[in-house]
Image (spheres, helix red, strand yellow):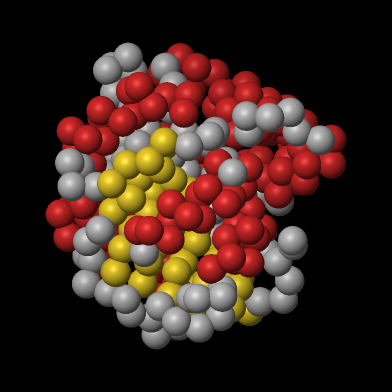
Amino acid sequence: MAIQGGKYIKVAQGVEIFVQDEGNGDPIIFIPGWTFTSEVFSKQVEHFRKTNRVIVIDPRSHGKSSITMEGNDYVTHGSDLVKVIAALELKDVTLVGWSFGCLTIWEYIRQQGTEIIKSLVFIDLSPKPLSINHEQNWVEGPLDEIAAAYTHYLHNRDKQREFISGYATQVMVQRELEAYELNWLVEQSLKTPHYIAANLFASGMFSDYREEAKLASESVPVLTVIAEHWADIAKPFTEKLTPKSSIEVLGGHLMFWEHDEKFNKIMEKHI
């Protein structure tokens, strides 16, 4: 199901954020990961709009939102989220972030605290994505591999397509994707130009939100959903950093799309 329609919220001069807003009840905001769009949450929109007010956004320079040369970092993405929530006059909000979308939420908490937050769902990202001690910490990969991804794949559109295609088939989804599914996933990502994708990649990798992750878990109910492929490291890392958070292990990096029924049931218990 593709998400249709929606509205735009101005967050800066010449910058508008695309927002899909459906249903009634306690609000849930879904925030997609690096270069992806609100479309990836279509199965959650369809499910949760029956019981909740469901809001999905395209962060700046993603999807239907404004493409801009300014603010392509997660500090600004957090500020944009602050403005979206204020414009919609929300309270008792459940925030759901996938991958680098988690960074947007942690940055929101750094700026605003947890006062209007009801609960939090973090999907498959460490609050410190990069470390030289990659064998002991939950990170996106060894430093040399991350550097190679940045220098080799994120400086032209064709290489960006190759990078996303490989990541989708090897990390995001466990089953073999149909050609149309892979094309759809890649095209979602390519809506963010490669030069902006590179900025966001660097901004995300150099982030450290461990203190915000601790604060969140001590303040409101927190659910962390971890992909199976790195659960052996990610689960104990999360248990040590945020011992009060609930942890679930499911599928690959895009488990909420591939295993949507299981994921939605897990989320229902939490919110």
Q: Is residue 156 left or right of residue 11?
A: right
Quadrant of the frame with the C terminus: bottom left
Q: Quadrant of residue 185?
A: top right
Where is residue 22? Give x, y as percent: 58, 78
Residue 73's x, y, as percent? 45, 50
* Closer to us: 52 or 7: 52
Q: What quarter of the picture does the N terminus occupy?
A: bottom right
Spot occupied by residue 195 in the image (x, y as percentages of width and height): 62, 41
For the point 52% across and 72% down, which residue is it?
A: 54
Q: Is residue 146 above or below residue 155?
A: above
In-image side of 137 versus 42 (left or right)? left
Q: Looking at the image, which residue is at 28% across and 46% down?
A: 246
Asked whether the viewer can see residue 205, the reply is yes
Q: In this view, does 43 lie above or below 93?
A: above
Residue at 56%, 23% (x, y): give it. 149
- Name the image quarter holding residue 127: top left
Determine if residue 72 is in view. no
Is 156 displayed left or right of 61 in the figure? Answer: right
Q: Nearer the viewer, residue 201 or 195?
A: 201
Q: Residue 57 appears at what percent x and percent y?
A: 55, 65
* Number of disc labels: 0
Residue at the image position 50 percent from the left and 17 percent from the top? 145
Does residue 68 sit above or below 257 in this rendering?
below
Q: Residue furthest right?
A: 179
Determine whether 114 is above or below 132 in the image. below
